[in-house]
């Protein structure tokens, strides 16, 4: 049984699928295979992590067997975007499609583990109108509410603030995923990714109002640098 899976919800028939394979798979060679770097790191700690790639119309045995594990949704994100990207320049999928594909892969309704939207800025709100993909609310919020609507009532949902490392790197606290931000004109490590993890409790009847974005919560620590709901 795995401790976690790294889920790649991108269509292998999409013309830009190679972008996901280049960053997260074997197309870019060992130095670019972000998933395997994380898998190897987890193995060094005695944990089991398994990469799972979406296959249209097919259930995945690992996904079907999930009970209390963690599911990490991988890909690039932006604050307030309704979508994530499968590698730079890769397929862009919205939160509904992401949920569709995870369910199609066989995630049981009884799953009581954690869904972690392991994407940059997935816990952050954005400015509506700044980009056609920006709907304002955090990607993690959209996913949590959509999955609750589909009947997933036992699991918990998490998003992340800031620019997060997409694979483990050496830093001040050892080898971990870190959050990066611009400090005095330079990109600096400002904390561990786990410190910027925010739980999103589903809204049974979600009401998305841009007005709510004017009054975000104000957390302490380095989280105060970011705008999140």
Image (cartoon, grey):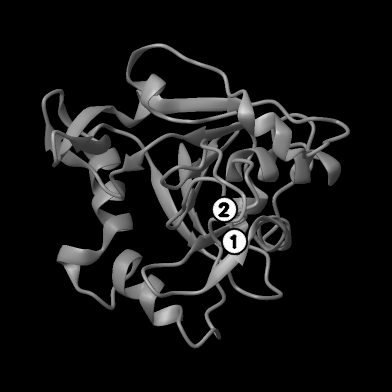
| Residue 168 left/right relative to 48 | left
Please tell me whether mark 1 sits on a helix, a strand or a loop: loop
**Nearer to the camera, 35 or 91:** 91
Q: Residues within 10 Å of mark 1 (few under 14, many from 20)?
A: some
Q: Quadrant of residue 200?
A: top right
* Residue in the picture at 60% in, 66% down: 93
Point out the tag, 2 or 1, that comes first from the N-terminus: 2
* Residue 17 drawn above or below residue 71: below
Residue 185 seen in this snapshot: yes
**Nearer to the camera, 96 or 46:** 96
Residue 156 seen in this snapshot: no
Which disc number belongs to residue 133? 1
| Residue 115 left/right relative to 26 | right
Residue farthest along the top direction in this orientation: 220
Read off the residue under disc 2: 81
* Residue in the picture at 29% in, 39% down: 42
* Residue in the picture at 36% in, 69% down: 88
Q: Are marks 2 and 1 in contact (CB under 8 Å)?
A: yes
């Amino acid at each position: 049984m795995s401790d976690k899976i790294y889920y790649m919800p991108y269509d292998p028939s999409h013309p830009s699928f190679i972008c996901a394979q280049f960053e997260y798979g074997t197309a870019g060679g060992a130095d670019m295979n972000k998933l395997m770097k994380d898998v190897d790191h987890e193995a060094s700690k005695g944990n089991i992590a398994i990469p799972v790639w979406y296959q249209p119309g097919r259930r995945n045995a690992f996904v079907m067997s999930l009970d209390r594990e963690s599911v990490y949704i991988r890909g690039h994100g932006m604050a307030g975007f309704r979508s994530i990207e499968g590698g730079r320049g890769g397929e862009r999928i919205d939160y509904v499609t992401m949920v569709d594909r995870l369910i199609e892969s066989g995630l049981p309704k009884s799953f009581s583990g954690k869904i972690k939207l392991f994407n940059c800025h997935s816990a952050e709100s954005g400015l509506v109108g700044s980009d056609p993909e920006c709907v304002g609310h955090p990607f993690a919020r959209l996913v949590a509410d959509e999955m609750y609507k589909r009947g997933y009532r036992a699991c918990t949902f998490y998003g992340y603030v800031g620019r997060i490392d997409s694979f483990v790197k050496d830093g001040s606290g050892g080898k971990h995923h870190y959050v990066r931000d611009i400090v005095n004109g330079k990109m600096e490590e400002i904390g561990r990714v786990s410190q910027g993890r925010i739980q999103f409790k589903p809204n049974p009847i979600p009401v998305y109002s841009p007005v709510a974005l004017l009054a975000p919560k104000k957390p302490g620590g380095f989280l105060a640098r970011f705008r999140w709901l």
